[in-house]
Image: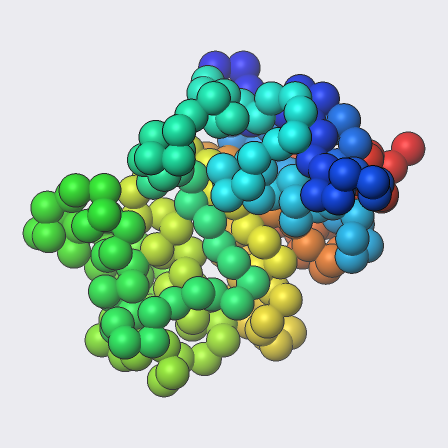
Amino acid sequence: MDNLVRLRTVVKQYEPAGPPALGGVDLTVAPGEAVAVMGPSGSGKSTLLNLVAGLDRPSGGEVEVAGTVLNRLSETALARFRRANIGIVFQFFHLLDELTARDNVLLPAQLAGSSRRAARARADELLEALGVAGRADAYPARLSGGERQRVAVARALINRPPLLLADEPTGAVDARAGAQVLGLLRDLNQGGQTVLLVTHDESLAKGAATRIETMRDGRWAA
């Protein structure tokens, strides 16, 4: 596969009379790349990530991930594809408060039909690798911001997705935890994980990405 992600003239229009959130964007991401998309608020970068994640649908053009054109899939098929192929790390973690760290990580594997035993082994392996094995039985309210983001990364990786998406992954953590997240994303990419992230954090983009693209007003900046 030449490219893991390919966007072809993608348009996203929310208001019929207003300017498009994305105005005919092309993008390719090769396997093993770490691409950071930067730009001011309202530039379209989060819209772009949501389209690649299959959380939103384009108004025009094609969004292709791992050889599949997402806008041709039904909602059921899209959810199934996303579980198997895309891991997502959000700015505000989106951990379930009533589940322990380990059970938060296990959830996508259980939804994908993995056995409890295999999923638990994978979850514990990830928590160990990410330095939070000792917090596996803690609930999110007892975790620091950096620990919660590491648990969120473990959850995103539990099903071994070829593509990891990160939406402002340092936006809700302090500087020390942000540096840890930067190192984590860099290590994952150096281990072969393909990463597409959007961020305002120039140090994160320069430290974790192999390529930086900038958006303005729904298009790539010149």
Location of residue 219 by image quarter? top right
Work out which residue is located at the far top of the displayed protein and give it.
Answer: 2
Q: Is residue 53 above or below residue 95?
A: above
Q: Position of residue 72 (x, y in %)?
A: 47, 21
Q: How is the image coloured?
A: rainbow
Could you tell me if residue 187 is visible in this image?
A: no
Closest to the observer: 202 or 164?
Answer: 164
The residue drawn where x is 34% and y is 69% is 96
- 199 on left or right of 64: right
Residue 220 percent location from the top left of the image = 82, 34
Residue 156 in the image: above or below residue 160: below
Q: Looking at the image, can residue 113 be seen?
A: yes
Q: How many marks?
A: 0
Residue 200 lies, with reference to residue 72, above or below; the image says below
Residue at horizontal 65 percent and vertical 30 percent from the top: 59
Q: Residue at x 52, y 31 (%)?
A: 32
Residue at 55%, 41% in the rendered image: 56
150 left or right of 53? left
Q: Is residue 176 above or below residue 166?
A: below
User: For this rendering, which residue is in front, 58 or 203?
Assistant: 58
Q: Residue furthest front?
A: 17
Residue 105 position within the rendered picture, expressed as x and y whole percent measured from the top left: 29, 59
Q: Is residue 149 left or right of residue 154?
A: right
Give the side of residue 215 with respect to residue 114, left or right: right
Question: Which quadrant would residue 133 be assigned to in this image?
Answer: bottom left
The residue lying toward the viewer, choosing from 129 and 26, is 26
Q: Looking at the rendering, in which quadrant would you find the C terminus?
A: top right
* Residue that extends furthest to the bottom in the rendered view of this protein: 142
What x and y, as percent, mark residue 14?
70, 43
